[in-house]
Amino acid sequence: MNVAQQLVNGIVIGHAYALVAVGWTLLLGAARLVNFGHGQMYMIGAFVAWWVMAATGLPYWLAVVAAVLLGAALGAVMQRLFLRLTLSQDLVNLMIVTLGFGQALEGAAGLAFGPKPQTLASPFQEMSVHLGPVWFTVQDAILVGATILVFALLYLALHRSWLGAAVRMVAEDPRLTALGGFKVSRIYMGIFAFEGAAVAFAAALVAPRTPILTSMGFDQVVMTFVVVVLGGIGSVLGSYVAGLGIGLFTALFGALVSPAYTTAAVFALLIAAMVLRPGQLAASGSFAR
Amino acid sequence: MTHPLARLAFAGVLAVLGFLLPRLLGGSSLVYDTLVAIAIFSAMSYGLDVILSDLGEISLVHTAFFATGAYAAAILTVTYGFSAWTALAGAVLAALALALVLGVITLRTREFAFSLVTYAAAVVCMNVASNWDFLGGSDGIVGIPPLDLSIGGIELTAGRSAEFWPFAYLLLLLTLYVVHRFRRSRLGQAALMVHMNPRLATMCGLDGNRIRLQVFLLSAVISAAAGWLYAFQRAYVGTDLFDTYFLVLMLTGVILAGRRILLGPLLGTALLLSQKSFASLGAYGDKLVLGVVLVGVLCLCPKGLASLWPRRRAAAVTDAPANTNPANTNKARFPSPVWERGQG
């Protein structure tokens, strides 16, 4: 086995996990919302990018922009739907409602895009870089760069800007934020729109690696769930580290032990972490660390 | 309807009418198929209902219990050639074993964390089922024989849907009876107290964790029994049993009518599956409908459709302690002070 190649694969996959997870991380940290519809939002992002390229012939980068815009719109729709539950912090009902939202998205995408698998063709997927014993595609390099950029920007925005302070305040206490004269629903709108835009951006960058299907939502992001929860609720740096760690773990576990049981192994890790350290989930102090 | 005998007679008439329902609806094979599916899936939903309504937690692992029942039935009858009765015993035991492990793991987690851990457990189960050859791997197990529950000289077999109906209906009635008895039993009352007021429960000498575990085991058995029958009806089990569709169907069925209403999950499941059978919009359209219904109910009337019916609500308040939860009503009337937030 080529260890160096597996490490490179792990780093690329890990950045993909982290980028797919970033919107969800913010949503979970700021609104306590476990978004089980995240996978279907990813699928919609990929299909919108594909459709823009297939139907209008626009170049790849414009398709990425279109997917991000539509993703943000989808996030805004979610905010309109879930605002009441979010404000009352009915966490468990919120969780179920996102399951239903995901089902609805999957049904709608099936009606709109049909059952056939498609390929989101990125010109960078064909270009590869060979460095000694390892190789990767230019798309992979762009993915890693974009992920680092998004995380850095989000971290700076949360810690150095007025807007970030407002988001952290909502995460800490929505009522108090409202007393402070902020429009809580507007801040939530921004958070939800970021979730939608971020996952669509991730989809447009990650999806060229594999064929896309309208039923792929669950499988594609199931690891993201682990990244988000294991990274610590809403912790931006935590989810980057968790994404990278799980990427390396899956690459090495898949190569050394068994590719089939990778998901089970990662989820067993998650269960162990949650059961041994349940306090980690309840703590709100870890947000935006 | 207050007299116990009158109530019993009413339930009896309802049960007989329910049994004759497929014939009253014309007796076509589509009607039989639909009603058998309604009976099986609502029985499955009652497993979740017990957790959701009485324990106040949301389990996302009940598809795995349903699948455990189905897989146990398939393996015992196809691989080992046992009878359907043995398969039922095997299904119950397998579900109890799985529930015991999961129950012990999730014992200390509540609400949010409980749902996350159960979701993770469901993913692990699905991953194992699709890769372990003993469980058929990704191909599943085919060729499950027709249901044969003959005892001694009495022949009880079912091949087609029309023959299947009495068994599915009996399972449903049995499930309803168990859930009804459970809610009036010591365990059911204790579960409610542990849910509503854990401190009071502890002061009354109840062991909250033990009660949660017992209810969890009961609910697993209910869902597994439904899975057992489903395996015979479909003659095939596969990893599609873990599909989110079943989970969403269960949750929507339970939530649609309202919590802690005995017939609620049955009515909810019946509405959803009738739409699928008689007014289908294709596989994708049906998914869309299911999702929209779940989102709509939770966003517009989180207490279920029954809460829109004023008479029913008045009755429910006197009947069911669920609606008189002091924590909930207080929250609704007076916004809790800021310093109390985060403790609840």
Image: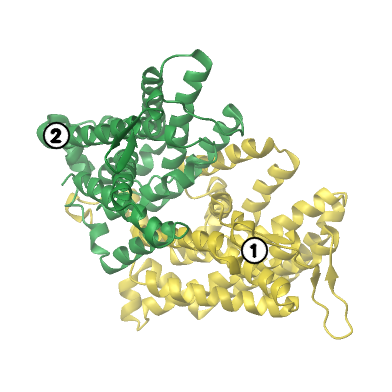
Chain colours: A green, B yellow
Is A173 on the left-hand or right-hand side of A21?
left
The crowd level at tag 1 (other Cα within 10 Å; few <14, some 14-19, many 20+) is many
Judge by depth and name the residue closer to the eye, B13 or B1. Answer: B13
Q: Position of residue B204 (x, y in %)?
A: 35, 81
The residue located at (81%, 48%) in the rendering is B30
**Relative to residue A3, is residue B101 depicted above or below?**
below
The residue located at (45%, 31%) in the rendering is A46
Chain under callout 2: A
Is A199 on the left-hand or right-hand side of B317?
left
- SS assignment at label 1: helix
Q: CA distance from mark 2 to mark 1?
A: 52 Å
Is A275 on the left-hand or right-hand side of B274?
left
Q: Position of residue B105 (x, y in %)?
A: 38, 72
Chain under callout 1: B
Q: Which residue is mark 2?
A: A156
Q: What is the quadrant of residue A107 in the picture?
A: top right
Q: The N terminus of chain A is located in which quarter?
A: bottom left
The crowd level at tag 2 (other Cα within 10 Å; few <14, some 14-19, many 20+) is few
Q: Which mark is residue B43?
A: 1
